[in-house]
Amino acid sequence: MQNRFEGYKTTLREILPIGRSFDVVERKIKIGGKEASMFFVEGLTNADKMQRLMSFLLNIGLNIGGMAGGKITGNTAVNGAGCGAGFLQSGSTEDFIQRNMPYLSCDTQTDINLAVKSVFTGLVALIIDGFDKIIIIDEREYPMRAVSEPEKEKTLRGAKDGFTEGLMTNIALIRRRIRDRRLIFASHTAGDVTKTDMALVYMEGVADAALVKSMTDKIQALKINTITVGEQTLVEMLSELDGNKKRKMNKLNPFPKVRYTQRPDIVSAHLTEGKIAILVDNSPTVILLPTGIFDFMQDVDDYYFPAITGNYFRLLRVMNFFVILFITPVYILIVEKYIPVFQFMEFIVPDEGCAIPLFWQFIILEIAIDALKLASLNTPNSLGLSLSVVGALILGEFAVQAGWFIPQTILCMAVVALASFTQPSMELQYGVKFMRLIMLIGAGAFGIYGACAGLAAGLLVMGTTKTLIGTSYLYPLIPFNKTAIKRLLFRTGAGAEK
């Protein structure tokens, strides 16, 4: 036992950066006269709990009548009162925990690597002279922000809580809504360096068992060093297929293969419908799958209002999808006389020539709007209004007065920018944007035939896209499922968010 204690201590000191990284700490104490060492990461443990744990451990020797003089060969012998002449004689770590630490969350470990991993997840590794195993004590407390409503997914009504960067907090937010024994949180770890904790969440008996097994196998087969930027790295690794050609096509495909959300009510509703969620530690965003193009046409507000209002919201979202996709290439075709225009709409056609061709005006505005979005993202809140005034009013007005742009192109791009905010998925917004740019380039270069070719290319990419589990991206349109497509396009009942 003595050699095992010294071996544990020496190995832990070698592996852990004791003395090199000030947050990794070793505390040397004596428990009942026996040498002991505690290893933990100071920033990941609760200071108050650690103080109480230290006091508790130092008092164990007093409660068992001193274990320094005992011979560590037999069973623990303690008198009826729990103190006095008894002394600890056992080398069994489990007996020690059961008799002296019954109210603490403890486990035992003999694998040094697993013990080190536990330390870096916030647990405390305790080794005591004369005991055969490492005691792992749960005293962790991760730094995290409070639960609040997600900035990107605000609702007019309904719940105002959102996921945080804490995995256990996120699990509790889902469990609070689904109090069913069939709700399963399967634990996984990914990243050889980061060793990031993940949870595969599903409803047993509701989710497709083959789908659950397939995702479990994929996660376990992951070969990745780090998951420092959370869910996107994970999705990219899971979506990679064998073969360089398919891998390159995956990277060039702009359409999102999963749905991201930070709302527990949306995740809970999807789970009850048989879908799977993936939670990643250090990320407030949850991955939902399988997800097709029609799943992005829904939003949680559709179900927090009466059916007629919810259907109106969904109709607006579908209409805006087509506005975002077609308005700029169609406008170029109208101006170039490829598409006839009604007499009462002739005002949209410019009366005179432009200093910059319409095609290049739209290309410049597409880039300018994204640049303004990035500028807004990195602008302090107190200056956000100023950026809006400068970007939308001053730059736009003077650009028209200087002859760079015409009012019609500014209006078209303003409509596109506003309509894009009705889509709940930013990833889909950019997927549609790239498809619109292809059509725009085709219309500017080859007229109506180029626009049709760009549309066909976009539809081909969308049609050949597979979800993360390999199902059709256009389901339930391809393969056709009347009931499912009706449910996705129309709010048919007072159910949860699908």
Image: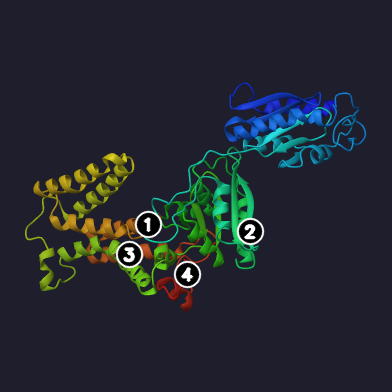
Asked if disc 3 and disc 2 are in contact, CB closer than 8 Å, the reply is no
Q: Which residue is mark 3?
A: 321
Q: Which residue is mark 4?
A: 475
Secondary structure beneath label 2: strand
Q: Earlier in the sequence, mark 4 or mark 2?
A: 2
Secondary structure beneath label 1: helix
Q: Could one spot residue 242 in this view of the protein? A: no
Left or right of 336: which side holds 98? right
How much space separates mark 4 and mark 2, taking CA atoms?
26 Å
Secondary structure beneath label 3: helix
Please tell me in which quadrant of the rendered image residue 341 appears.
bottom left
Of badges 4 and 3, the one in the foreground is 3
Callout 2: few (<14), some (14-19), or many (20+) C-alpha neighbours within 10 Å?
A: some
Q: Could one spot residue 252 in this view of the protein? A: yes
Residue 431: which numbered mark, if any? 1
Q: Which residue is mark 2?
A: 184
Please tell me in which quadrant of the rendered image residue 14 appears.
top right
Q: Earlier in the sequence, mark 1 or mark 4?
A: 1
In the rendered image, residue 337, in percent from the top left (x then y), is placed at: 15, 67
Q: Number of labelled discs?
A: 4
At x 52%, y 65%, the residue is: 471
Camera-side residue: 377 or 411? 377
Please, what is the three-letter code of the amino acid marked with disc 2? Ile
Relative to 15, does residue 179 appear above or below in the rendering? below
Camera-side residue: 281 or 396? 281
Please, what is the three-letter code of the amino acid marked with disc 4? Tyr
